[in-house]
Image (spheres, helix red, strand yellow):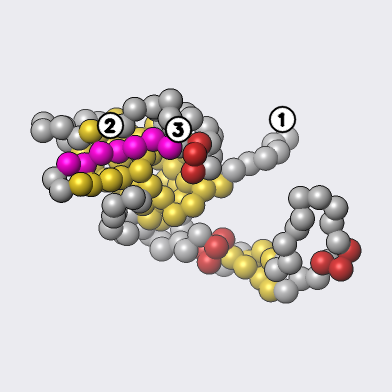
Amino acid sequence: MTTATILGSMGSSTTELPFFSARVPAGFPSPAQDHLEQKLSLDQLFDVDAPHTFLVRADGESMIGVGIFDGDVMVVNRAMPARHRDIVIATINGDTFVKRLTQAGEQIVLYSENPKFSPRYILEGDELLIWGVVMGSIRRHHSHA
């Protein structure tokens, strides 16, 4: 089961990064695509709604079916209301998880996106808190040791 570790709030930034609008092929690159079209801030890219946007680190493999892997940093909006089929950060009886929220009538079920993990039905007496809606995730592909 994938748990979540709250890293902290995400403040707005004035830093803009170069954005090349041409897509990069996974095969051989085209030299004709070497031009900068605009600047893009991470605030725009992740629709940061400071101070309601937080960073949360995923721990586990239960959400790999939607591209959230162990160690990924998720961008979470606490101001956005959670809806049926949203990926959410949820606390159940004090334990924090990242899951897909579903609701059929009164029954709330949190699903993993990995068939190895069973759904978590919210039962009478369970304390459920939806912490926020996952807007996106960031994965690091290379790190310097």
Q: Nearer the viewer, residue 113 or 71?
A: 113
Task: State the residue position of label 3.
Answer: 114
Q: Nearer the viewer, residue 100 or 131?
A: 100
Residue at 43% x, 30% y: name it: 115
Task: State the residue position of label 2.
Answer: 120
**Category of crowding for the residue at label 1, using alpha-carbon neighbours closer than 10 angstroms: few (below 14), some (14–19), many (at least 20):** few
SS majority, magenta: strand
Task: State the residue position of label 1.
Answer: 145
* For marks 2 and 3 on the same chain, the one whose residue lies earlier in the sequence: 3
Farthest residue in the right direction?
Answer: 31
Question: What secondary structure is found at the residue carrying circle 3?
Answer: loop
Query: Residues under labels 2 and 1: Cα distance?
Result: 38 Å
Query: Residues under labels 2 and 3: Cα distance?
Result: 13 Å
Q: Is residue 24 above or below residue 104?
A: below
Q: Which residues are magenta?
A: 107-114
Residue 87, given in percent of the width and then of the height, sits at 38, 47
Residue at 28% x, 31% y: name it: 120
- Residue type beneath disc 2: Arg
Residue at 50% x, 36% y: name it: 64
